Amino acid sequence: MLSAGLPHGAVPKLERPGPLRERVYEALLELITTRALRPGQHLVESELAGHLGVSRQPVREALQRLNTEGWVDLRPAQGAFVHEPTEEEADQLLTVRTLLEAEAARLAAANATSAGITALEELCATGEQAVADGEVDTVVATNAAFHAKVMELAGNVVLAELAGQVDRRVRWYYTPVARQRGKQSWIEHRELIAAISARDEGRATEVMRAHTEHTRATYHQRNA
């Protein structure tokens, strides 16, 4: 049941301006990305509509769109279910992420300003505190913000657009291993900041590649 699988307060009623179908879509996608709606979970239109405070129509439209994008599986005579990614799907996406982020790190080392480096340090401090406090949702969000900041400092619009296309799924795959990666992930972030601060493009590339590969390996080992 949906209601048994969502933490209390995880689904606030939607605020009103903006196209309703878009807001329902974004709300459901965020719940899937954060794993409040877990892979394989049955999605009942009436329950989702009740949680979101809307009619079933925009929920049905959102589920159809999420199905097209690979987040939801619509099964004949069974209904909608959150997609369960295969190991191969995860591996392919995380491999592409490594390529994009390694290049972003190299460009950030070449282009980052002192203000940009300070922003990375502040995000790293926030992430370290979240790990210490056991706040997994904050860890995941801050990790995404840190990597987005590196991408921004790279200064390549096309690279940023490509990274944006995989960002949601990276968060989806990172959430179940965030606690496992824990403090070590942020130690690696500190190493990356040091390389960017030193303008060492080769080292920044190497650190980011190793960092993203560690996450990929941890994902595959998560149930070991």
Image: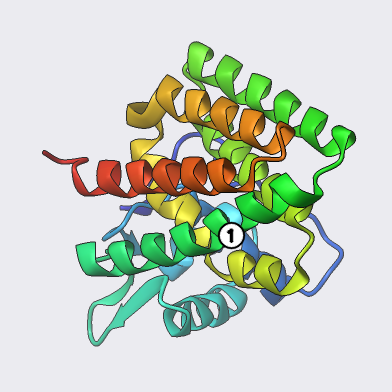
Where 222 sits versus 30, above or below? Answer: above
Q: Disc 1 marks which amino acid? A: Glu
**What residue is shown at x 79% (from left), y 54% (from top)?**
15
Give x and y (percent) for residue 95: 37, 63
Q: Is residue 96 visible?
A: yes
Q: Is residue 36 visible?
A: no
Image quadrant for the C terminus? Answer: top left
**What residue is shown at x 47% (from left), y 55% (from top)?**
170
Give x and y (percent) for residue 219: 28, 46
Instruction: Find disc 1 in the rendering and name its residue.
Output: 103
Horizontal relation, residue 79 to residue 103: left or right:
left
The one nearer the camera, 136 or 4, is 136
**What residue is shown at x 52% (from left), y 12% (from top)?**
133
Where 60 sits versus 219, above or below? Answer: below
The one nearer the camera, 150 or 9, is 150
**What residue is shown at x 34% (from left), y 41% (from top)?**
214
Residue lying farthest top? 132
Residue 43 image-quadrant placement: bottom left
Give x and y (percent) for residue 48: 49, 61
Give x and y (percent) for residue 126: 66, 22
Q: Secondary structure at mark 1?
A: helix
